[in-house]
Amino acid sequence: MLEFFDKPTVSAYEIHGRLLPARVLETSGIPSVVFSEDALAFVHFVPTLSFDFTVLVPDERVQEAVECLQKELPQYQVTQERSYRMTDKSGVCALPRAVRLEWDEAKLKEKLDHRTPWYILVVPQSHFHFDVNDGTRVRGLIPPFDPSDARIRFPTLPAFINSLIDTMFEPVEGVSRASHLRFQGFYLGSFLSYLCIYNIRDEDGAKDPETGELLPAAQALLEGVKPENVALLETYLRTGSMSILPELSVERQRLKAERLAISRTVRPTFPFQIQDRISPVFPGRPHGTTPRHSPRHSPRHSPRHSYSTLCRVSAPPIRLLQSVLRMKTIFR
């Protein structure tokens, strides 16, 4: 039986320890966003284990961020070792320009405490189609937290989902198909599943068992993503499938081009259509405006139309949890 939470499942003390690399970057003036499991656990309340402390930075500042971390935290050294979740059998990494830092075992006795990350992964923001300087895509921790963590940023729920789906469709240039498929199964797909499960908060899935219609929480997820990402997300919510069909990719490119054309002429002035359960914690900063990817800026967009015309669904409806298990089995 699943248990859902309205706060992180780890203490503020543990969160403070994990966020050490993010505080170093923030103090040094390098814009960054905490990603991966730490973002899932700390602001989206997913009870997950912690692996590499993953932080996104502007592409042109990756090396600067690495040097900054090594200067302030000399116990960390660059390593060529990569997690099995993002490499194929030949060792090709799905995040080729990311830099991984490992705590130097020779300095193990100097380890601050058990909370400190063993690995730090510094990732160019373009690898996840994210803009760390876009204030509408980020949020902060919920109280209580250490005052020194107040300005550390995490992806909002819509931004997190969009980033994952964007990366599914648009892998880093030059990455092998085998590497990307493994990355999609172990990393992108798992994170998307977690975000859906722990925000819809219903063990039976995203649909009303009597009417077959999406639950309000599931519909809210759809309303927050970019028009070109609605079809895949709705297919997943209804069937548990994350298959990327050729015609879906073609139509997604069209919708993306349309959105980008409109965004160059429309200045957003509306509040967010959906908010995280807790508002971002940034003193003096407004909640933000509607992102230009909002469906309301795409007059031809219709979630129902996108689903019925773009997605050929052959698999019977299954629960979200079943799809997670099946997906992990496929990519094992």
Image (cartoon, rainbow, N blue to C red):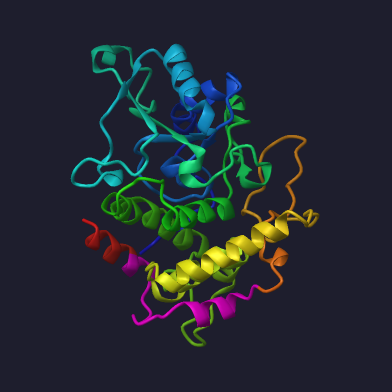
Picture quadrant where residue 184 is located:
bottom left
Image: 160 above or below 304: above
Image: 246 above or below 67: below
User: In x, y percent, where is residue 88?
Assistant: 23, 47
Side of 135 where 120 appears, left or right:
left
Q: What residue is rendered at 24% in x and 13% in y?
A: 106
Q: Name the quarter where the N terminus is drawn.
A: bottom left
Side of 160 where 50 appears, left or right:
left
Q: Nearer the viewer, residue 78 or 48?
A: 78
Residue 128 in view, yes or no:
yes
Picture quadrant where residue 103 is located:
top left
Q: Nearer the viewer, residue 43 or 165?
A: 165
- Asked if residue 321 lies in the magenta stretch, the reply is yes
Residue 293 in view, yes or no:
no
- Asked if residue 176 lies in the magenta stretch, the reply is no
User: In x, y percent, where is residue 125?
Assistant: 51, 39
Q: What residue is rendered at 49% in x and 68% in y?
A: 250
Where does the magenta region start and end? 301-323
Image: 111 above or below 18: above
